[in-house]
Image (tube, rainbow, N blue to C red):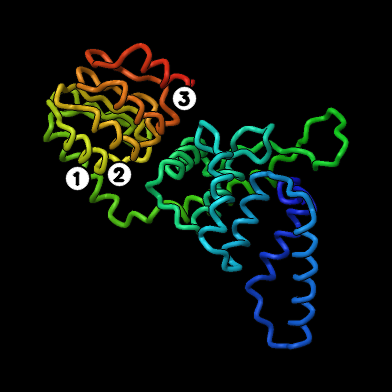
């Protein structure tokens, strides 16, 4: 069994409880045996020290939801999972590992059952992490690891297939639960193209004809226009570059751009934004290049953003 699944005795016990939870057995004897086993497992879990891994917290949250815990009782575990999110938008299996599809997808899946909406910044950053790290073949790259108690020999683990399968599966489950189906994607894209041209804009596509860049520097857009374009441009999930040039753009606009968490390059030339507006960009976890020529942003404001977004 993969070390990620067999992470600890605690994890296996949680998996067993989740498997038992929906059971509704007609045979009274069998139902009683399951009840006794469940009660023994719950008693053991109440005594064992939690491992405090992402998977442990996610599975415990799922179990709490299934057993009808109140919103007040769920909140501490939700807060802990959100605290464990990395700056790149993902979660890692353990504290010493990098963000990956397994932990991120699993956490998204668990959080989807507690009322967190898809437009919440933490969820958007996680979705952006998964969409940005998916490989061309549809899978996600994963790094195999040893079982926690296994003695390593110094020879790298050579079989990435199991963990790649599990990681990709969790990524899909997390995305399915966090991103609504877009039945009108083509219509939305057509609307986006029409408005880009209407505002004298330009767009760039990659080798697969997916839109990756939009340049709207040729029209004085307002804050409302920025908000409208943010909605339209969500039809292009691979969009990573966006450019504006307008002195009608104020501190109200950066908040709209949170809906495009996959952005890596952003230009806000001549915009009337200050350090307060700049702070709203902290949710763009993948941002690498920011053009602020002609704005009212200070060096202090830029340094503050760079601390939050070191990339």
Give the residue at x 76% y 51%. 6
Are the residues at dot 3 and dot 1 in contact (C-beta closer than 8 Å)?
A: no
Q: Vertically, is 261 above or below 44?
A: above
Query: Earlier along the polypeptide chain: callout 3 or callout 2?
Result: 2
Residue 22 in the image, given as x and y percentages of width and height: 63, 73
Local crowd size for mark 2, using a 10 Å CA cut-off: few (<14), some (14–19), many (≥20)? many
Residue 182 in the image, given as x and y percentages of width and height: 33, 54
Residue 250 in the image, given as x and y percentages of width and height: 20, 27
For the residues marked 3 and 2, what is the alpha-carbon distance in whole angstroms?
27 Å
Q: Can you tell which mark lies on residue 212?
A: none
Local crowd size for mark 3, using a 10 Å CA cut-off: few (<14), some (14–19), many (≥20)? some
| Quadrant of res 18 | bottom right
- Residue beneath label 2, please? 235
Secondary structure state at the residue bearing disc 2: loop
Secondary structure state at the residue bearing disc 1: helix
| Residue found at the far top of this picture | 299
Give the residue at x 70% y 65%. 17
Q: Residue 149: tell me if it is visible.
A: yes
Q: Residue 311: tell me if it is visible.
A: no
| Left or right of residue 150: residue 14 | left
| Quadrant of res 34 | bottom right
Q: Vertically, is 15 above or below 251?
A: below
- Residue beneath label 3, please? 308
Query: Earlier along the polypeptide chain: callout 1 or callout 2?
Result: 1
For the residues marked 3 and 1, what is the alpha-carbon distance in whole angstroms?
34 Å
Tell me the mark number nearer the camera, choosing from 3 and 1. 3
Give the residue at x 35% y 11%. 299
- Residue beneath label 1, please? 191
Residue 209 in the image, given as x and y percentages of width and height: 33, 36
Tell me the mark number nearer the camera, choosing from 3 and 2. 3
Query: Earlier along the polypeptide chain: callout 3 or callout 1?
Result: 1
Secondary structure state at the residue bearing disc 3: helix
């Amino acid at each position: 069994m993969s070390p990620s699944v067999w992470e600890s005795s605690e994890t296996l016990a949680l998996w067993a409880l989740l498997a038992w939870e929906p059971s509704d057995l007609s045979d009274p004897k069998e139902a009683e045996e399951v009840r006794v086993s469940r009660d023994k497992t719950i008693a053991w879990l109440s005594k064992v020290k939690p491992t405090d891994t992402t998977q442990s917290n996610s599975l415990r949250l799922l179990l709490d939801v299934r057993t009808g815990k109140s919103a007040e009782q769920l909140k501490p575990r939700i807060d802990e999972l959100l605290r464990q999110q990395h700056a790149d938008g993902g979660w890692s299996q353990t504290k010493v590992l990098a963000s990956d599809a397994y932990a991120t997808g699993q956490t998204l899946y668990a959080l989807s059952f507690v009322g967190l909406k898809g437009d919440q910044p933490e969820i958007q950053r996680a979705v952006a992490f998964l969409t940005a790290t998916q490989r061309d073949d549809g899978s996600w790259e994963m790094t195999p690891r040893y079982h926690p108690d296994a003695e390593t020999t110094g020879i790298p683990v050579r079989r990435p297939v199991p963990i790649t399968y599990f990681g990709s599966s969790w990524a899909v489950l997390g995305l399915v639960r966090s991103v609504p189906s877009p039945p009108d994607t083509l219509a939305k894209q057509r609307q986006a193209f029409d408005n880009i041209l209407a505002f004298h804009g330009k767009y760039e596509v990659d080798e697969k004809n997916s839109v990756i860049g939009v340049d709207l520097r040729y029209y004085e857009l307002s804050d409302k226009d920025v908000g409208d374009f943010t909605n339209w441009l969500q039809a292009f999930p691979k969009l990573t570059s966006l450019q504006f040039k307008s002195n009608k753009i104020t501190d109200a606009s950066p908040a709209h751009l949170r809906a495009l968490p996959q952005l890596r390059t952003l230009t806000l030339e001549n915009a009337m934004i200050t350090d307060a507006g700049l702070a709203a960009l902290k949710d763009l976890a993948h941002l690498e290049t920011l053009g602020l020529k002609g704005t009212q942003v200070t060096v202090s404001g830029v340094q503050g953003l760079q601390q939050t977004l070191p990339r």
